[in-house]
Amino acid sequence: MALKAGHVNDFSGSLAEAIENAMKTEWQTVKGSPMPDTDPADRRILFVAIAQGVLSYLDSHATDAINTIEYDDGIGGTSTLTIESVDFNVTL
């Protein structure tokens, strides 16, 4: 499954939707009341922009983030696998 940043018109199941849900939860926790729904369209533009920026950055720096994997070799030791290329399968 691709990592989906989302768009204002394609919000469901996206990182932007997860950011919005986290914002609602944190708002409730900190403020003690539900987040006002005064202008969800403007807020979604912000969340989509953040999600697209984060996933674009991760996608272009994937090999910087993951370059080795250490694993159990099955005979009582560990081995290291060097990763030359990573594809996060990002959908912007």
Image (cartoon, rainbow, N blue to C red):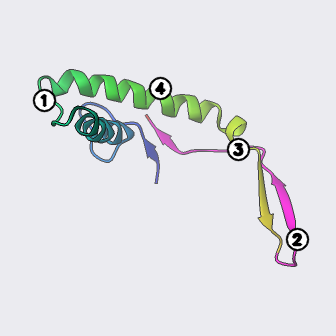
How many residues crowd around disc 4 within 10 Å: few (fewer than 14), some, or many (20 or more)?
Answer: some
Q: Which residue, given by chain and number where applicable, does mark 2 sit on? A: 77
Query: What is the secondary structure assignment of the residue under circle 4?
Result: helix
Identify residue type, mark 4: Gly
Q: Marks 4/1: CA distance?
A: 24 Å
Q: Earlier in the sequence, mark 3 or mark 1?
A: 1
Q: Marks 3/4: CA distance?
A: 19 Å
Q: Nearer the observer, disc 2 or disc 4? A: 2
Which secondary structure type mostly characterizes the magenta part of the structure? loop
Residue 76, numbered label: none
Q: Marks 3/1: CA distance?
A: 39 Å
Q: Position of residue 64 (x, y in %)?
A: 71, 35
| Left or right: where 41 falls relative to 3 | left
| The C terminus, quarter of image | top left
Q: Marks 2/4: CA distance?
A: 40 Å
Q: Earlier in the sequence, mark 2 or mark 3?
A: 3
Q: Is residue 11 magenta?
A: no
Q: Which residue, given by chain and number where applicable, does mark 3 sit on? A: 66
How many residues crowd around disc 3 within 10 Å: few (fewer than 14), some, or many (20 or more)?
Answer: few
What residue appears at the point 31 percent right and 32 percent down from the top-left corner? 7
Residue extending farthest to the left is 38
Q: Position of residue 70 (x, y in %)?
A: 79, 58
- The one of 7 and 25 positioned closer to us in this rendering: 25
Q: Which residue, given by chain and number where applicable, does mark 4 sit on? A: 53
